[in-house]
Amino acid sequence: QQQVKQSPQSLIVQKGGISIINCAYENTAFDYFPWYQQFPGKGPALLIAIRPDVSEKKEGRFTISFNKSAKQFSLHIMDSQPGDSATYFCAARASANSNYQLIWGAGTKLIIKP
Amino acid sequence: SAVISQKPSRDICQRGTSLTIQCQVDSQVTMMFWYRQQPGQSLTLIATANQGSEATYESGFVIDKFPISRPNLTFSTLTVSNMSPEDSSIYLCSVPGQTIGEAFFGQGTRLTVV
């Protein structure tokens, strides 16, 4: 119940296309869902995050769609660029969890082909 | 935001030896986290380090193998003891941000045990 399931494991998208990464969870105590971006040789960095009281959040070319009833959320990257090639992790946190721990998805390696 | 300096960035070590990884944060933080990331895999939490108390280890990780020090609110070390090739991985330190679910990471230490 503590898992966050992420798919696909890897994704290849043409430049200018839409990249879509999906995550699903079971624990209804989760109330914060961030996405992290990791480039080779670097630590993950927060990209965008959403709370379950909204169905969508957009920041530039990055959009999170959230379906509370289905317990699913997804990251959409519009007009994907080669610089977006990285590994993306979804995560979840329960705010009642005082130890700040994040539950991580397995990661998606995204390659944008020029 | 927090800036985290982690060193060494990489090392190649002989089996049976130990390596100490240092993590320096540019601001005072209560909690620091140590993660292990196998190549191409997700993040696995090793332990949570609070200043002034013993670290809390996750299932599968023990203090004898991964001793942690947390002498003050800006610094921590993780030692990987009696290394074997199975310990080859990327080790990351992390601190929580101001926003729920936000975390900042060091650039990681890529450890290879031969």
Image (cartoon, coloured by chain):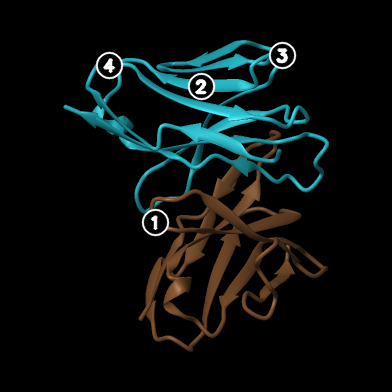
Which residue bears the numbered disc 4? A17
**What is the chain letter for disc 2?**
A
Spatial CA distance of label 4 from label 1 is: 27 Å
Of all chains, the one bearing label 4 is A
The verdict on a common chain for dots 3 and 2 is yes
| A92 shown above or below A81 | below
Residue at the image position 45 percent from the left and 58 percent from the top: B38
Q: Label 1 is found on which chain of the structure?
A: B
Mark number, residue A53: 3
**Residue B3 seen:** no
Q: Amino acid at mark 2?
A: Ser
Q: CA distance from mark 4 to mark 2?
A: 16 Å
Q: CA distance from mark 1 to mark 3?
A: 35 Å
For this view, does A74 lie left or right of residue A16?
right
> What amino acid is found at the position of numbered circle 4 in the picture?
Gly
Label 1 or label 3, whichever lies nearer to me, is 1
Query: Which tag, 4 or 2, sits closer to the chain's start?
Result: 4
Q: Nearer the viewer, residue A101 or B59?
A: B59
Q: Are marks 4 and 1 in contact (CB under 8 Å)?
A: no
Residue A24 is situated, as x and y percent measured from the top left of the image, at 58, 28
Identity of the residue drawn at 58% across and 76% down: B79
